Amino acid sequence: MRLASLLLRAATLAVVALMPACDRKAPYTFGVVLDQDGMRGAQMAMEEINAHGGINGHALKLRYVGGAGSTKARLALETASVLAADPSVLAVIGHTNSSASLAASQVYNAQHVVQIAPTSSAPIYSDAGPYSFRLVGSDLHQGVFVANQVLARTPRPRTAVMFVNDDYGRPLHEIFVRQLQTGGFAPVYDSPYIEGDANTDLTEVVDALTRAHPDLLVWIGRAYDYVRLQPMLKKALPKLVIMATDGFSGGTVAVDTTHLLDGVSHVRLVDTHRKDVGLQRLRARYEREHWSEPSDQAVLSYDAVLVLADAVRNAGAEREAIRDWLSLVGRGHPAVQGLSGPIAFTADGDREPQYFLEEIGKERLDSLRRQRR
């Protein structure tokens, strides 16, 4: 009788040991397709959520996928297909840029998987589908904002424009130039560039800019291509003022120890100096661990995890329920309080725009360097 009791107990323990895979307290998983900065922000949010008991008692897991910085549609589609096919992935945070987010959105909407793009701002993303959300406004607004910054200068500067020839740069450039023209103003130089193109003749680009005699260069693109051009540009046009769009923010700025980017004013989507306890706690931790201030993508990726966690907490761990709940945030459900401010979605899944113009200065980087020592 004693032996039978022991065998029954052992069998019961074996069943219990096998239960986590199907137990209601099994972890919840979000896919993450971001570059390093965004992944760090998402990781910090996950750690804080789990430190406070998870989501309704479930631990949160993040499934990271590499190649996040690519703008290639094929890679974005492949990544989205892998995540959408995994039933444990409840939603996806990504992708890093507009081109990749737009390509991937086709898969996510077809498979009914919520996608929150932290920083993808291309206007066409508003039409990506009912499962695609983002934490920034459309570049319809940013283009007007940057143009108005130019038009507000007295006297109006001779303005040159360079824009990256992709899904991010082309529409933002078009809106920017149209707003300048509305103000009775036109650029003295206007040219696209191909991102990361090693065959670009930088001397030819600088010569063309020099012939236009600009006072101001508006850079619609990322910082790493500007860094290649900067030494020659600085030598040819030492007094040229640089203004850049939000694509400039990110890792390149954070690791610019040679100060090539000093003095550039660029659009920020997050006011990282805002007096908010949670934001300043994240900023302090980020600077301590990664020797740089958090980029827009880091903060917005953190917020994306918070928003999805709230959706699961309130609506349950079903893909359809998550989408339905998010679609009413700010329009039926209260706005979610993120580190970047209140988060509410329009009917298109967009967020109301907010922009801050910030100048890059060596004092900030030197301060961080001293902290690291």
Image (tube, grey):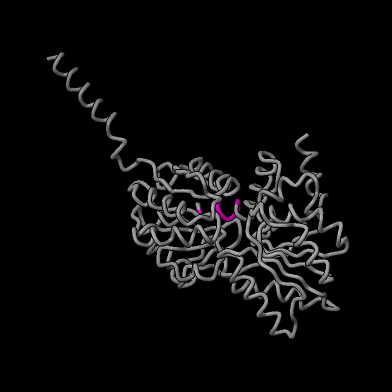
Total numbered badges shown on the rendered structure: 0
* In the rendered image, the vertical position of residue 227 relative to residue 5, given as above or below: below
Q: Which stretch appears magenta?
A: 298-304
Q: Position of residue 176 (x, y in %)?
A: 66, 74
Q: Is residue 120 left or right of residue 78?
A: right
Q: Residue at x 40, y 57 (%)?
A: 314
**Image: 269 above or below 287:** below
Does 302 appear in magenta?
yes
Residue at coordinates 38% horizontally, 58% vertically from top-left?
A: 107
Question: Is 194 on the left or on the right of 80, as rendered?
Answer: right
- Left or right: where 82 falls relative to 259: left
Q: Nearer the viewer, residue 32 or 198?
A: 198
323 above or below 285? Answer: below
For the C terminus, the quadrant is top right
Residue 63: quadrant of the picture: top left
- Residue at the image point whose x is 44% and y is 42% from the top: 61
Place of residue 257 in the rendered image (x, y in percent of width and height, measured from the top left): 78, 44
Estimate the x, y position of residue 250 in percent, counting from the top left.
Answer: 66, 52
Q: Nearer the viewer, residue 109 or 272?
A: 109
Q: Quadrant location of the N terminus?
A: top left
Location of residue 115 in the rendering, given as x and y in whole percent from the top left corner: 44, 58
Looking at the picture, tell me which residue is in the foreground, 80 or 313: 80
Magenta-span inclusion, residue 106: no
**Chief secondary structure of the magenta span?**
helix
Front in this rendered view, residue 327 or 212: 212
